[in-house]
Amino acid sequence: MNYEIKFTHGEDNLFVSSNSHYAIADIVVIKTEKYKMMGRVVREASTDLASEGYIVSQANVLDFEAADKVAQESDAAKVLVKRLVQDHKLDMKVIEVKYTLDYKRLYISFTAEHRVDFRTLLKDLASHFKTRIELRQIGSRDVAKTFGGIGPCGRPLCCSEFMGEFPNVSIKMAKNQALSLNQSKLNGLCGRLMCCLSYEDDFYRQARKNFPDFGDTIKTTDGQARVIGLNILSNTVKVRLDNHIQDYDISEIEVV
């Protein structure tokens, strides 16, 4: 069977295989051709998905102790990486530095306004750490995914809890759901449109086909009226009649 694994250091989720059963939220040790890491089981995945590694075992006390040591050495490495970035006068902000569990790789995540030429920096990093270095420029969404937090809904951020790839989100999705277009209410902690706007977009787009547009003239049991509001969840339309406003069920109206 296959499992989707999430890492604490903001890397993309990984699909791995195992002959044993694991529960959601189990912490496991996984191994790929490139590295050995600890991660959290997000869900059981389809066996049709290509496996990128396998689960060695469920993490035990020794694994957690090794992970703590890796975390301490990663923190120490971050200090040195920041100093080298300053020495090279590069316009980049180091977000996270993380060793793999077997020290075969050192992942360095950073943000920058523009593309950064870090070739000379990479040589110095390889010289200092004597391991394979992977520099990765990330955006504000990735930063939120790495550090986590609480969203406007009061729950942990989707990206840091279970999400693998970021969905494409547009302001049109908010319009489809008749939400306020106030950016402060639509943006997440990353400063970008909240990913959850995409979750129900298909439902709203399909349901919207059964409704008239704003401003359309419709026929009701009380005469002709103009559409001024839609409530897709309650299946009702708000209209303006000659001298008052009233709600009608979608089955009670007819577009003129």
Image (cartoon, rainbow, N blue to C red):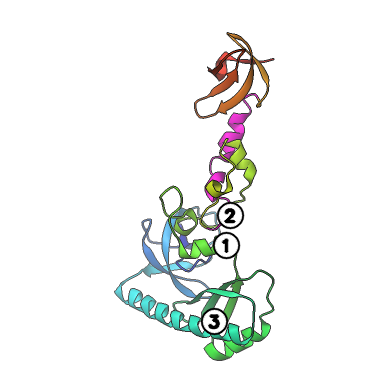
Nearer-the-camera pick, 158 or 223: 223
Percent x, y for residue 235? 53, 24
Nearer-the-camera pick, 244 or 204: 244
Residue 13 visible from this viewpoint: no
Please state the extent of the stretch shown in magenta in the rendering: 190-212
Numbered disc 1: secondary structure: helix
Mark 1 and mark 3 in contact? Answer it, CB < 8 Å: no
Q: Amino acid at mark 2?
A: Arg
Q: Magenta span has 26?
A: no
Q: Amino acid at mark 1?
A: Ser
Question: Is 113 placed left or right of 195 in the picture?
Answer: right
Residue 205 visible from this viewpoint: yes
Please give the residue where the numbered disc 3 appears in the rendered image: 82
Q: Magenta span has 198?
A: yes
Mark 1 and mark 2 in contact? Answer it, CB < 8 Å: yes
Q: Earlier in the sequence, mark 1 or mark 2?
A: 1
The mark found on residue 192 in the picture is 2
What residue is at 54 percent from the left and 54 percent from the top? 48
Question: What is the spatial separation of the Cα atoms under label 1 and label 2, in whole angstroms?
Answer: 8 Å
The mark found on residue 140 in the picture is 1
Percent x, y for residue 197? 55, 45
Percent x, y for residue 241? 60, 14
- Quadrant of the snapshot with the C terminus: top right
Question: What is the spatial separation of the Cα atoms under label 1 and label 3, in whole angstroms?
Answer: 19 Å
Question: Is 67 placed left or right of 205 in the picture?
Answer: left
